[in-house]
Amino acid sequence: MTWFVYIILCNDDTFYTGITNDVWRRFEQHASGRGAKYFYGRQPRRLVYLEAGHDRSSASQRELRLKKLSRREKVLLIESDCNRIDDFLTESAALRPAEDHA
């Protein structure tokens, strides 16, 4: 099973870093208030960074390393990796369940 390390930009311009094996499910959990306590009082704005290809252990280790970065270092990381996140969003859009607009 592939694990992902992700960074979400929040509505208060802070970054949240986490791991998951299902990026969209986890984002939706955060958005609905069923995710991490960090999202009590704030909302995820968008996914800004994603690393794939981890197992549970390496994802956890990478998450800890990213959480220790300064905001400036995180911004540089996100900016240097923008093509990967855009590719993921494009490729995975077809895999996401269609939203019910009823």
Image: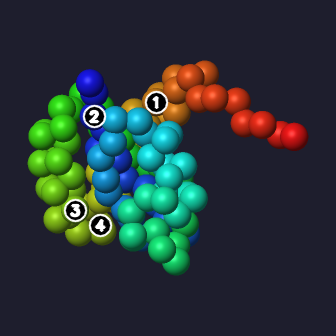
Residue placed at 52% from the left, 73% from the top?
42
Callout 3 amino acid? Lys
Q: Secondary structure at mark 4?
A: helix
| Image vertical order of residue 62 relative to residue 92, above or below | below
What label sits on residue 3 in the rendered view? 2
Which is nearer the N-term, disc 2 or disc 1? Answer: 2
Residue nearest the viewer, comparing 13 with 42: 42
Residue placed at 52% from the left, 63% from the top?
33
Q: Secondary structure at mark 3?
A: helix
Q: Which residue is mark 4?
A: 72
What label sits on residue 88 in the rendered view? 1
Q: Quadrant of residue 83?
A: top left
Q: Secondary structure at mark 2?
A: strand
Q: Quadrant of residue 35?
A: bottom left
Other-residue count near label 4 (Cα within 10 Å), few / some / many at <14 / 14–19 / ≥20: few
Callout 2 amino acid? Trp
